[in-house]
Amino acid sequence: MKSIYNFSAGPAILPAAVIQQAQEEMRDWRGAGMSVMEMSHRSKAFIAMAQQAEADIRDLMAIPDHYRVLFLQGGASTQFAAVPLNLFNATKNQADYYLTGAWSKKAIAEAKRYGQIHVVADTSAQKFTTLPAPGSVKVSPDAAYVHYTPNETIQGVEFHTIPDTGDVPLVADMSSNILSRPIDVSQFGIIYAGAQKNIGPAGLTLVIIRDDLIGKAAENVPAMLNYATHVKAGSMYNTPPTYAWYIAGLVFQWLKAQGGLPKMAEINQRKAAALYAAIDQSDFYHNPVEPTYRSWMNVPFTLTDDTLDAPFLQQASDHGLETLKGHRSIGGMRASIYNAMPEAGVQALIEFMSEFERTHG
Ligand SMILES: *Cc1c(COP(=O)(O)O)cnc(C)c1O
């Protein structure tokens, strides 16, 4: 088999051990005589697997008992609507949003359909290369919630501290940095994430929601978008994304075997530091993000001479370094280095970059 390192932003690399186990269990899941894909979501076997996955993520993230964990479909983009639809009501339909990059921009555009949105932090004038300083953002006391994007996957900016919003529930789109380090879940009202970056395959969306925020949606909110529906049915109101749920469960077990989120944080920080150091020490490569707010997960960089972009990508691919092309809105390159990217992959990229600079600089 061809051995490569996949730097895709999403769907993204999964741990090799997880793919291997999925392959071994593909046709006959632990003696069931069928694959997980062919199993009823109401079967004992699947329910046990699903419950184990929930127990494992609760354990990994130290999720308090007064939070529910939902395994849904529709991607993070569906949550852009679900959040206001569940948290706005007849007496309160305003929310505060941070505008810090392409994904928060989309979340804002969607939320505006349902209520009054106040953009309380806006880094668009800095081309999303920085973030508001901790403590500098004022929350409206009347806001139903405050929404922010802890890691902007496209721009490569990441909050390394959690905003303090007092009694106003904090909602986070954690699609691209969930499980990358320990966080204090009790500081959030809702955390949501599309699975395809740091959890598992596309098709699964994780929602972690505090009990008091459930059951507030208006009567006309579609059942499928109402958190209460899914809480009541244990994420099985309709057919859940069973295979993706199973793979996510394998990833959670893999994370525990690695030493959990404290260990992942240590490794992720080391990987990011090495790559940023390689970029910063050269005039050939450039990352525009203010160092304090650089992402541990997504590292965009440009070549000073952009006519070298195509040869860079081609030769990287020849070296087994795949999917390094930057997002179409930004150009240049982007290395996504999620949990499943081994340190050896980052080292291989750094060595290739140095060699490419030597031969083209
Ligand atoms: C990828 C991504 C999304 C979109 O996720 P979908 O599951 O494709 O809807 C939203 N927010 C962030 C931060 C992302 O990285």
Image: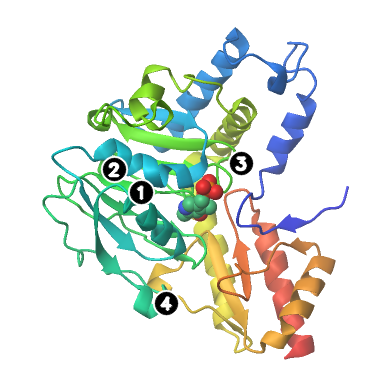
- Ligand 1 has an atom within 8 Å of the beta carbon of the residue at disc 3: yes
Q: Secondary structure at mark 2?
A: loop
- Numbered badge on residue 172: 1
Does the rendering let one see residue 278?
no
- Numbered badge on residue 127: 4
**Percent from the top left, x then y, of residue 306?**
67, 85
**Percent from the top left, x then y, of residue 98?**
30, 61
Q: Residue furthest right?
A: 1
Q: Which amino acid does the dot numbered 4 rest on?
A: Lys
Q: Secondary structure at mark 3?
A: loop
The residue that mark 3 highlights is: 202
Does the rendering let one see residue 304?
yes
What's the residue at 57%, 62% (across, down)?
271
The residue that mark 2 highlights is: 188
Q: Residue furthest front?
A: 220
Q: Who is closer to the viewer here, 24 or 68?
A: 68
- Ligand 1 has an atom within 8 Å of the beta carbon of the residue at disc 1: no
| Residue 107 position by quadrant | bottom left
Q: Are marks 2 and 1 in contact (CB under 8 Å)?
A: yes
Q: CA distance from mark 2 to mark 4?
A: 27 Å
Q: Which sits earlier in the primary sequence, circle 4 or circle 3?
A: 4
Q: Which sits earlier in the primary sequence, circle 2 or circle 4?
A: 4
Q: Who is closer to the viewer here, 274 or 193?
A: 193
**Dividing the image into 4 quarters, which one contains the C terminus?**
bottom right
Q: CA distance from mark 4 to mark 3?
A: 29 Å
Q: Are marks 4 and 1 in contact (CB under 8 Å)?
A: no
Q: Which sits earlier in the primary sequence, circle 3 or circle 1?
A: 1
10 Å neighbourhood of mark 3: few (<14), some, or many (≥20)?
A: some
**Percent from the top left, x then y, of residue 283?**
60, 89
Q: Secondary structure at mark 1?
A: strand
